[in-house]
Image: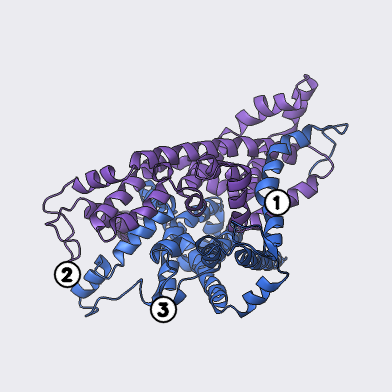
Amino acid sequence: MSGIDLTGRALVAERPGRRAARRNRLLRDGGWYVVLTAMAVITVFPFAWMFLTSIKGPTDAITSVPPQFLPNAPTIANYVKVWDSLPILSYFLNSTTVAVATGLLNMLVAALAAYPLAKMRFAGREFIFYLLLATLIVPAQLTYIPSFILAVNVFHYYDTLPALIFPNIVSAFNIFLLRQAFRGVPNDLIDAARVDGAGEWRIWWSILLPIVRPSLAAVAIFTFVTSWNDFLWPSLMLHTPKGMTLPVGLAALQGFFSSDFRSIAAGVTMTVVPILLFFIVVQRYFVRGLAGAVKG
Amino acid sequence: MTTFTRPILRKPTATPYLFLLPALALLGVFVFYPIGAVVYYSLTDYDIVRPPVFIGLDNFVRLLEDETFKLALLHSFIYLIVTPILIALSIILAIVVNRKLRGIHIYRALYFVPAVSGSIAIGLSWRWLFDRSGIVNSLLQTWGVIDEPIQWLATPSLVLPMAMLLTIWAGIGYYSVIFLAGLQNVPEELYDAARIDGATDFQKHRYVSIPALRPQIVFVAVISSLAALKVFDEIYVLTNRTGGVLDSGVTMVFYLWEQAFERSNAGYASAIAIALLVITLGFSIVNVRLLERGNAPGDR
C-alpha cells in the first residue's frame, strides 16, 4: 500500500495479493496453534493419563503395549474405594482450613509491616529492611529441627492444624510485595488525611488498604496455594490420619494402595481437581501477584 | 531508600514499631530463634528425645568425611542445571504465548496447571507415567524405540535427571508468566524500529526482548536456583521416600530430612543445615555480584 504510482493495473493486482496475505496469516496462525496444542499436550498429559487410569475397571488394561487410552467400561469404583478407605473429606477440610487461615493472616501481618516500611521514617528502618531481606535467603528446612522441638515442647501443637499455620504467618516476600504497592500511593493523599486529623491506623485501614486491594488479594491467594501444596513441614507435624492435609494424605496413599494404580490415580485426581477449579476462578490475581513481585 | 524528601512523621513515636511488631515477633520465633538453635544443636549429640550433649565440632568433622553428604552436595549442585534451562524454555514459551490469538488465554492457563497442582500430586502422576510398565515405556515399545522397558526411576544414573525433568516441566508455565508480564511492558516501538532496521524475528527477540527482560531473568535465576538447592518433594515422591537406589537421588535437604527425622540424628542434621545455610548465603552473594555486574553501564 505504497500509494505512489497507484495505477489501475496495480489495483487489479492487489486483490489476489491481499487474499494471499490473508492466507499467509491463516497458515501462520494455524502453525502457532499446532505449536501451542503440542505444548498443552505435554503439560496436561500426565493429568489426563491419571484421570483415564482412574476410571478404568479391572477389565481395562492400564499397562498394555500398545497402551489402551480409553476405558471400554468407565467406572467410578476406584473413587468409591478411595473415598471409603481414606478420610478424603477430612483431608480436604483440613487443607482448606490451613490454607485460608494462612492466606488471611499473611495478608494482615504483611499489610501491617509494609506500611511503615513504605511510608514512614523511623530509626532502624534500614536495619529492619535488610533483616527481612536476609530471611528470604534462609532455607525454611533449616528451621525445621528447632521448629519441631518448639511444636512438641513449647507450643504443644504437634499433630494439630495450628502447627501448620503459625510458622507460616509471615513471609518477607509478601511484605515486600505490599510495600511496593503502598509506595505507589501518593504521599499527598496520606498528608491530606493527617491534616484532617486521621491517625496512622485510620490511614492504614481507610486509605491504604482499599487502594491496594488487588495486591492484598494477590498475597492471600498466592499464600493460599503455596500453603495448600506444602508438604515437608506438614508431613513432619501430622500423624493422625484424620488430621492430615491433602498432600500428606496423598503421599500416604502410595503406601496404602501399593501397586493399585487405579486407586492411586483416583486419589490424585480427587485432590488435583479442587485446586484447579480454584485456580481457574482466581487466575487473574495469581498472574498479577507473580508479575508484581518482580517490579520490586 | 532515599526517596523521602521530608519527614512524614515529625516526632519519634512507637507507631511504626507497632505496625512491624507482629511480623518481627513471628520471625523472631520461627526464623531467628531456630537459626541460633540450629547453630547450638550442630555442636551437640542430640536425638530430639534426650537433652543435647555438647560435643564441639565433631559433627562438622564427621560431615567432611561423610561420603553420602558429599554425594548430596554434588547432587544439589548438579540440580542447579535446571535454572538456565528453565529460564531459556520459559522465555521461549512467553514469546510464543505473547501474541493475539483466539483462545490464547486458555492455553496460558493450561501451561500453568502443573504449577498449582502441588508437587506430591504431580510426583505421583510422574511415577505412574515412568513406571516400569507405565505408558512412556509402553509408547516407546510400541513405536519400536526400545525393546525392553527402561527402569526410569530405579536406574541410579536416571533418578536425578528424572527429578530435574519434573522440576523443569512443572516450572516452565510458572516462570513464563513472569516473563510474559515483562514482555507486555516492552514498548511496541522498539519492535517496529527493529523491523525497520531489517531484523529477523530471531534478532528482534535477541536484541529487544531479552535485554528488556533483564530484571525478570535475574529474579527467576535467583528464585529458581534457591529452589533447586532446596529440592526435596520431587525426590521424596519419585524415589518413594528412599532417596533412590544407592542414594542416587539424595540432595542436601533430603539428607537433612533423613538424618533428622528418619534416623533421629538432630545434632548431625543441624550441621548439615548449617552447611546448607552457608552454601545458600554464598550462592546468594555470587548471584548479587553477577546482578550488579549485569547492571553495569554499557551492558545494555
- Badges 1 and 3, same chain: yes
Query: Looking at the figure, which quarter contains the N terminus of chain A?
Result: bottom left
Which residue type does callout 3 highlight?
Ser
Say which residue label 1 marks: B33
- Which structural element holds mark 2? loop
Q: Nearer the viewer, mark 2 or mark 3?
A: 3
Q: Nearer the viewer, mark 1 or mark 3?
A: 1
Task: Tell me whether the residue at label 2 lies in contact with that at label 3, contact meaning CB atoms closer than 8 angstroms.
Answer: no
Q: Nearer the viewer, mark 2 or mark 1?
A: 1
Q: Residues within 10 Å of mark 2 (few under 14, many from 20)?
A: some
Give the tally of numbered discs.
3
- Label located before the other in sequence (1 or 3): 1
Hue of chain A? purple
- Which structural element holds mark 3? helix
Q: Quadrant of residue A154?
A: top right
The span from disc 2 to disc 1 (Cα, nearest Å) is 56 Å
Q: Toward the viewer: A194 or B300?
A: A194
- Badges 2 and 1, same chain: no
For the colour blue, the matching chain is B
Which chain does the residue under circle 2 lie in?
A
> Residue A226's x, y, as percent?
50, 47
- State left or right for residue B48 relative to residue A122: left
Q: Quadrant of residue B126?
A: bottom left
- Which structural element holds mark 1? helix
Q: Residue at x 69, y 56 (%)?
A: B37
Which residue type does callout 1 highlight?
Tyr
Which chain does the residue under circle 3 lie in?
B
The span from disc 1 to disc 3 (Cα, nearest Å) is 39 Å
- State left or right for residue A3 relative to residue A216: left
Say which residue label 3 marks: B157
Say which residue label 2 marks: A65
